Amino acid sequence: FNKPFFLILNLAVGGYWPGDPDGNTAFPQQLVVDHVRVTTSDSQPGTGGRITGLAGKCMDVAAANTANGTPVQLYDCNGTEAQRWSVGTDGTIRALGKCLDVASGGTADGTPVQLWDCNGSAAQKWAISAARDIVNPQANKCLDVTGNSSANSTRLQIWTCAGTANQKWTVNG
Protein backbone atom coordinates (compact mmCIF):
# COMPACT_ATOMS: atom_id res chain seq x y z
CA PHE A 1 0.00 0.00 0.00
CA ASN A 2 1.23 3.50 -0.73
CA LYS A 3 -1.17 5.12 1.75
CA PRO A 4 -1.38 4.61 5.51
CA PHE A 5 -4.24 2.44 6.61
CA PHE A 6 -5.80 1.25 9.83
CA LEU A 7 -7.09 -2.20 10.59
CA ILE A 8 -10.00 -2.27 13.00
CA LEU A 9 -11.38 -5.55 14.25
CA ASN A 10 -14.50 -5.64 16.35
CA LEU A 11 -14.80 -9.08 17.92
CA ALA A 12 -17.15 -10.50 20.50
CA VAL A 13 -17.26 -13.87 22.23
CA GLY A 14 -20.63 -15.11 23.30
CA GLY A 15 -23.82 -16.59 22.08
CA TYR A 16 -23.52 -20.26 21.21
CA TRP A 17 -19.87 -20.49 20.36
CA PRO A 18 -20.14 -23.63 20.37
CA GLY A 19 -22.18 -23.45 23.54
CA ASP A 20 -21.87 -20.71 26.10
CA PRO A 21 -18.36 -20.22 27.52
CA ASP A 22 -18.12 -21.25 31.17
CA GLY A 23 -15.47 -22.11 33.76
CA ASN A 24 -14.52 -25.25 31.81
CA THR A 25 -13.94 -23.44 28.48
CA ALA A 26 -10.29 -23.55 27.41
CA PHE A 27 -8.95 -20.21 26.23
CA PRO A 28 -7.66 -19.05 23.88
CA GLN A 29 -10.02 -20.47 21.33
CA GLN A 30 -9.34 -20.32 17.60
CA LEU A 31 -10.74 -17.46 15.53
CA VAL A 32 -10.86 -17.98 11.78
CA VAL A 33 -11.11 -14.92 9.55
CA ASP A 34 -12.43 -15.89 6.14
CA HIS A 35 -12.80 -12.44 4.55
CA VAL A 36 -10.94 -9.13 4.72
CA ARG A 37 -11.82 -6.06 2.70
CA VAL A 38 -9.47 -3.08 2.42
CA THR A 39 -10.71 0.37 1.42
CA THR A 40 -9.33 3.85 1.82
CA SER A 41 -11.61 6.33 3.51
CA ASP A 42 -10.82 9.12 1.01
CA SER A 43 -11.87 7.23 -2.11
CA GLN A 44 -14.60 4.75 -1.33
CA PRO A 45 -16.41 3.72 -4.50
CA GLY A 46 -20.10 4.42 -4.79
CA THR A 47 -20.17 7.03 -2.06
CA GLY A 48 -20.99 10.67 -2.25
CA GLY A 49 -23.85 12.71 -3.46
CA ARG A 50 -24.67 15.97 -5.07
CA ILE A 51 -23.47 19.38 -4.03
CA THR A 52 -26.11 22.02 -4.69
CA GLY A 53 -25.63 25.74 -4.90
CA LEU A 54 -27.19 28.80 -6.49
CA ALA A 55 -30.83 28.29 -7.59
CA GLY A 56 -30.68 24.68 -6.33
CA LYS A 57 -28.44 23.67 -9.22
CA CYS A 58 -25.66 21.10 -8.94
CA MET A 59 -21.90 21.26 -9.03
CA ASP A 60 -21.14 19.38 -12.25
CA VAL A 61 -18.14 18.14 -14.24
CA ALA A 62 -18.62 19.49 -17.77
CA ALA A 63 -19.73 16.71 -20.13
CA ALA A 64 -18.65 14.13 -17.51
CA ASN A 65 -15.16 14.44 -19.02
CA THR A 66 -12.38 12.97 -16.89
CA ALA A 67 -9.52 14.79 -18.66
CA ASN A 68 -7.33 16.99 -16.48
CA GLY A 69 -8.47 20.59 -16.73
CA THR A 70 -12.14 19.80 -17.35
CA PRO A 71 -14.26 22.73 -16.13
CA VAL A 72 -16.43 22.38 -13.05
CA GLN A 73 -19.70 24.24 -13.51
CA LEU A 74 -23.21 24.86 -12.24
CA TYR A 75 -25.85 22.75 -14.02
CA ASP A 76 -29.39 21.43 -13.58
CA CYS A 77 -29.29 18.43 -11.25
CA ASN A 78 -29.68 15.26 -13.32
CA GLY A 79 -28.39 12.42 -11.13
CA THR A 80 -25.39 11.60 -13.33
CA GLU A 81 -21.95 10.55 -12.07
CA ALA A 82 -20.70 13.99 -13.15
CA GLN A 83 -22.66 15.32 -10.17
CA ARG A 84 -21.72 12.67 -7.60
CA TRP A 85 -19.16 14.21 -5.26
CA SER A 86 -17.50 12.72 -2.19
CA VAL A 87 -15.72 14.63 0.52
CA GLY A 88 -12.57 12.83 1.59
CA THR A 89 -11.12 12.80 5.09
CA ASP A 90 -8.01 14.27 3.46
CA GLY A 91 -9.84 17.50 2.57
CA THR A 92 -10.43 16.65 -1.08
CA ILE A 93 -13.71 16.85 -2.95
CA ARG A 94 -13.85 14.15 -5.64
CA ALA A 95 -15.88 13.16 -8.68
CA LEU A 96 -15.23 10.64 -11.42
CA GLY A 97 -12.09 9.48 -9.60
CA LYS A 98 -10.46 12.93 -9.70
CA CYS A 99 -10.22 15.97 -7.45
CA LEU A 100 -11.73 19.44 -7.41
CA ASP A 101 -8.69 21.63 -8.08
CA VAL A 102 -7.90 25.35 -8.22
CA ALA A 103 -6.29 25.89 -11.64
CA SER A 104 -2.49 26.23 -11.43
CA GLY A 105 -2.72 26.45 -7.64
CA GLY A 106 -3.92 30.03 -8.03
CA THR A 107 -5.00 32.21 -5.14
CA ALA A 108 -6.42 35.25 -6.95
CA ASP A 109 -10.11 36.13 -7.17
CA GLY A 110 -11.53 34.64 -10.37
CA THR A 111 -9.20 31.64 -10.59
CA PRO A 112 -11.30 28.84 -12.12
CA VAL A 113 -11.71 25.42 -10.55
CA GLN A 114 -11.36 22.24 -12.55
CA LEU A 115 -11.13 18.48 -12.33
CA TRP A 116 -7.57 17.14 -11.98
CA ASP A 117 -5.71 14.00 -10.94
CA CYS A 118 -5.57 13.92 -7.14
CA ASN A 119 -2.04 14.88 -6.11
CA GLY A 120 -2.26 16.01 -2.48
CA SER A 121 -1.53 19.65 -3.30
CA ALA A 122 -3.02 22.59 -1.40
CA ALA A 123 -4.97 23.48 -4.57
CA GLN A 124 -7.08 20.37 -3.89
CA LYS A 125 -7.79 20.93 -0.19
CA TRP A 126 -11.19 22.26 0.83
CA ALA A 127 -12.95 23.04 4.09
CA ILE A 128 -16.73 23.08 4.40
CA SER A 129 -17.96 25.56 7.00
CA ALA A 130 -21.13 25.47 9.08
CA ALA A 131 -22.12 28.60 7.15
CA ARG A 132 -22.19 26.42 3.96
CA ASP A 133 -19.03 27.91 2.44
CA ILE A 134 -16.58 25.64 0.63
CA VAL A 135 -13.20 27.26 1.23
CA ASN A 136 -9.79 26.60 -0.29
CA PRO A 137 -7.54 27.28 2.73
CA GLN A 138 -4.43 27.93 0.61
CA ALA A 139 -6.14 30.85 -1.12
CA ASN A 140 -8.47 31.61 1.81
CA LYS A 141 -11.21 32.03 -0.81
CA CYS A 142 -14.66 30.51 -1.32
CA LEU A 143 -15.98 28.32 -4.11
CA ASP A 144 -18.05 30.78 -6.14
CA VAL A 145 -20.45 30.74 -9.10
CA THR A 146 -19.00 33.22 -11.61
CA GLY A 147 -21.03 36.40 -12.01
CA ASN A 148 -23.77 35.16 -9.64
CA SER A 149 -25.34 33.53 -12.71
CA SER A 150 -27.58 30.49 -12.32
CA ALA A 151 -27.39 29.68 -16.06
CA ASN A 152 -26.38 26.14 -16.94
CA SER A 153 -22.65 25.73 -17.68
CA THR A 154 -21.61 28.73 -15.56
CA ARG A 155 -18.02 28.08 -14.45
CA LEU A 156 -17.08 27.82 -10.82
CA GLN A 157 -14.14 29.79 -9.46
CA ILE A 158 -12.63 30.95 -6.19
CA TRP A 159 -13.43 34.41 -4.84
CA THR A 160 -13.08 36.34 -1.61
CA CYS A 161 -15.73 35.01 0.77
CA ALA A 162 -18.64 37.43 0.90
CA GLY A 163 -21.51 35.35 2.31
CA THR A 164 -23.48 35.75 -0.93
CA ALA A 165 -25.88 33.18 -2.39
CA ASN A 166 -23.44 32.26 -5.18
CA GLN A 167 -21.00 31.03 -2.50
CA LYS A 168 -23.40 28.90 -0.47
CA TRP A 169 -23.39 25.11 -0.99
CA THR A 170 -25.26 22.15 0.41
CA VAL A 171 -23.30 18.91 0.49
CA ASN A 172 -25.60 15.88 0.23
CA GLY A 173 -23.53 12.81 0.96
Image (tube, grey):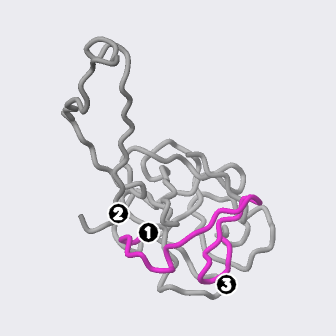
* Residue pointed to by mark 1: 115
Choose between 2 and 34: the one closer to the eye. Answer: 34
Query: In what element is the residue under mark 3?
Result: loop
Q: Is residue 151 above or below residue 112?
A: above
Q: Position of residue 5 (x, y in %)?
A: 34, 59
Q: Is residue 97 above or below residue 70?
A: above
Q: Type of residue at label 2?
A: Thr
| Labels 1 & 3 near each other (Cβ < 8 A) | no
In the picture, the quarter occupied by the N terminus is bottom left
Across the whole image, how many numbered discs are drawn on residues?
3
Which of the 4 image quarters holds residue 118? bottom left
Label 2, label 1: how far apart the Cα atoms are: 7 Å
Structural crowding at the residue carrying mark 1, measured as other residues with C-alpha within 10 Å and reported as few (<14), some (14–19) or many (≥20): many
Q: Position of residue 161 (x, y in %)?
A: 75, 75
Structural crowding at the residue carrying mark 3, measured as other residues with C-alpha within 10 Å and reported as few (<14), some (14–19) or many (≥20): some
* Residue pointed to by mark 3: 109
Image point (27%, 43%), residue name: 37
* Residue pointed to by mark 2: 66
Residue bounds of the magenta highlight:
116-142
Q: Type of residue at label 1?
A: Leu
Q: Is residue 138 above or below residue 76?
A: below
